[in-house]
Amino acid sequence: MNNESQTVSQTGRLLGVVQVRVGGRLYAVPVQAMDFASDQSDAQERGGFFVQGDTMGILVDEAVSEQQQQSQVRAGCEEAVRHLSAKFLN
């Protein structure tokens, strides 16, 4: 989980929203594409789920293939479920 995305809403391009169901609740989690060109880490590790205050979302690297973006969204959804489960079910 990434807690360092301080300017996500200002620099990310909204791709859509995924719905995550935890218990009896349904959460809308925005998915944004960002340019991670200055980051030298592996492309699969650049995106993912983030929480900043009361805001949460999933980031994907806009420079990678659609298949890699889908993988980043899947991983972000899994992390969102873990985060929301720990927060609301425990």
Image (cartoon, rainbow, N blue to C red):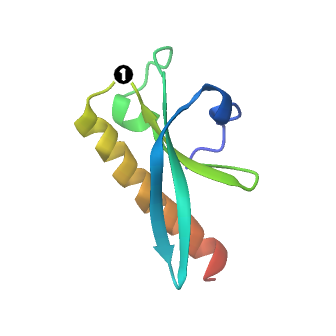
78 up-or-down from 63: above or below:
below
Which residue is situated farthest in the left direction here? Answer: 67
Rendering coords of residue 72 (x, y %): 37, 44
Q: Which residue is mark 1?
A: 63
Of residues 9 and 36, the one nearer the viewer is 9
Residue drawn at x 35%, y 53% as measured from the top left: 74
Q: Is residue 70 left or right of residue 27?
A: left
Rendering coords of residue 85 (x, y %): 55, 74
Rendering coords of residue 47 (x, y %): 45, 38
Residue drawn at x 52%, y 84% as measured from the top left: 23
Q: Is residue 15 left or right of residue 69?
A: right
Q: Quadrant of the C terminus?
A: bottom right
How many circles with numbers are drawn on the protein?
1
Of residues 57 and 37, the one nearer the viewer is 57
Question: Looking at the picture, which amino acid does disc 1 mark?
Answer: Ala
26 up-or-down from 19: above or below:
below
Residue drawn at x 45%, y 16% as measured from the top left: 37
Q: Is residue 33 left or right of residue 9?
A: left
Crowding around mark 1 (Cα neighbors within 10 Å: few <14, some 14 to 19, many 20+) is some
Rendering coords of residue 55 (x, y %): 69, 52
Residue drawn at x 26%, y 29% as measured from the top left: 65
69 up-or-down from 42: above or below:
below
SS category of the residue bearing label 1: loop
Which residue is situated farthest in the right direction here? Answer: 53
Which residue is situated farthest in the top direction here? Answer: 38
